[in-house]
Amino acid sequence: MTTQNYFERREQGEYAIILEGNKEIFGAGALAEVGAHAHHLGMRHVVLYTDSQVSKLPSLETVVKSLRDKGIKVSIFDGVEIEPSDRSLKAAVRFAEDNDSDGFISVGGGSVIDTCKAVSLYASYPPKNFLDYVNQPLGKALPAPGPLKPHIACPTTFGTASECTNVAIFNFLELGTKAGISNRAIKPSLGIIDPEALNTLPGPVVVANGLDVFSHAVESYTARPYTQRPAADDPTVRPVIQGANPFSDLNCLEAIRLIGENLVKAVSEPEDLGVRERLSFAGLLAGIGFGTAGCNLPHGMSYAVSGLVRDYRAEGWPQDHPLVPHGFSVIVNSPAVFRFMGPTCPDRHLEAAKALGLADDGREPGDILAAGVIAIMRCIGAPNGLAGLGYTSDDLDALTDKGWKQRRVVDNAARPISREEMREIFAGALTYW
């Protein structure tokens, strides 16, 4: 799929994309500006969301001081769970309801920012049923009834790019799967990306973040082109997830290139802070890209991998409960997906492989990309497929059951797949070396 193919009008197909502006500030030292921007947005009392680990880091201290220096009252909730659940989200909503504020600040990784995005919706317009705002088929995917309070997102990681998307993800404990909210209203008013916040990230967290960035970028680049969606009946309600498009392509290819040049180096040369700054910028680019295009199969399958975890505990994360870091839950599926879907859009897989720094050696493009990613996974200590996370062939049916329900991203693949094909891909993801 080349860029010019997008502009060949298809019979009854979609013909336009929505490009929503992202307001982001990127630069070393930018966290010290939070108070000025919050005051400018009219905030005088903010509810600040973080987690127990970030609450002890200099980044939070910088943000709180900046806010208070501008005379802004700060109420802090530090109970966000890593890989948040509906349980922690409901607690966060109650905190917002108990602390009437005129704005929100989030300081942390994707779990924190996603929680704050969801809180801004739930606390402003409490639904009749908790699932009303959740994507179909789990929920009703209701739109926000009105505008939300301003939210400044301050990421201390670089994987999710939650500061520039209108999606929030959480674990729905009762169903043992992840649930998503795709709603244009929840995109933060402003993202402040300070690469200096990454200086305290442990090596394994850098690895998982980088793999998540790569996944965002390559999945968006190999997603179903937006022109293959049916044209919207109402052009004012085009979906948040639109499919691959010229705008996302530009951002995602550069993000893949930056990951290819810097992720392994970030592990082997952790003292090189310039590498982390480039990774941070890659995360922003990929976030802007998948914010319009959307991810596809690896992410859809990852929600089952996270939701069904039994005993896996990753170095660098809390050890008090089983948890699969999001970047790991995605990347273990990716090589199997590339091998399976490569023939559907070989040019796309080959371009992604070249952006990663791989050569065209005559093999199927999906195989080239898969082999390159596996080599990186081995080099930086990523899990060896699903087996590396504790799964066996006995889990394939359960994984398929959960993954198949993630229609928002599964249907964004380059071609439709069957339930049995998803099971086949999961089987191909059990081990890689």
Image: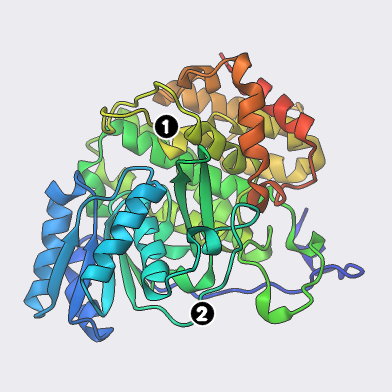
Residues under numbered marks 2 and 1 in contact, where contact means CB atoms less than 8 Å apart: no
The spot of residue 287 in percent (x, y) is: 49, 57
Screen quadrant of the C terminus? top right
Amino acid bearing label 1: Val
Query: Which picture quadrant has residue 381?
Result: top left
What residue is shown at x 67% (from left), y 44% (from top)? 351
Q: Is residue 262 visible?
A: no
Residue beneath the point at 76% across and 47% down: 414
**Front of the two marks 2 and 1:** 2
Q: Earlier in the sequence, mark 2 or mark 1?
A: 2
List the residue tagged with mark 2.
145
Q: Residues within 10 Å of mark 2 (few under 14, many from 20)?
A: few
Who's the residue at 26% across and 33% down the image?
Answer: 318
Establish if 60 lies above or below 189.
Answer: above
Residue occupying the point 62% across, 25% down: 371
Label 1 neighbourhood size at 10 Å, few (<14), some (14-19), many (20+)?
Answer: many
How far is the residue under mark 2 from the one under mark 1?
A: 34 Å
Kind of residue at badge 2: Pro
Q: Is residue 175 above or below residue 153?
A: above
Residue 286 coordinates in the image, percent (x, y)? 50, 54
Q: Which secondary structure lies at badge 2?
A: loop
Q: Position of residue 126 (x, y in %)?
A: 42, 71
Q: Which residue is mark 1?
A: 324
Task: State the image coordinates of residue 194 (x, y, percent, origin top left).
Answer: 27, 59
Q: Is residue 214 left or right of residue 70?
A: right
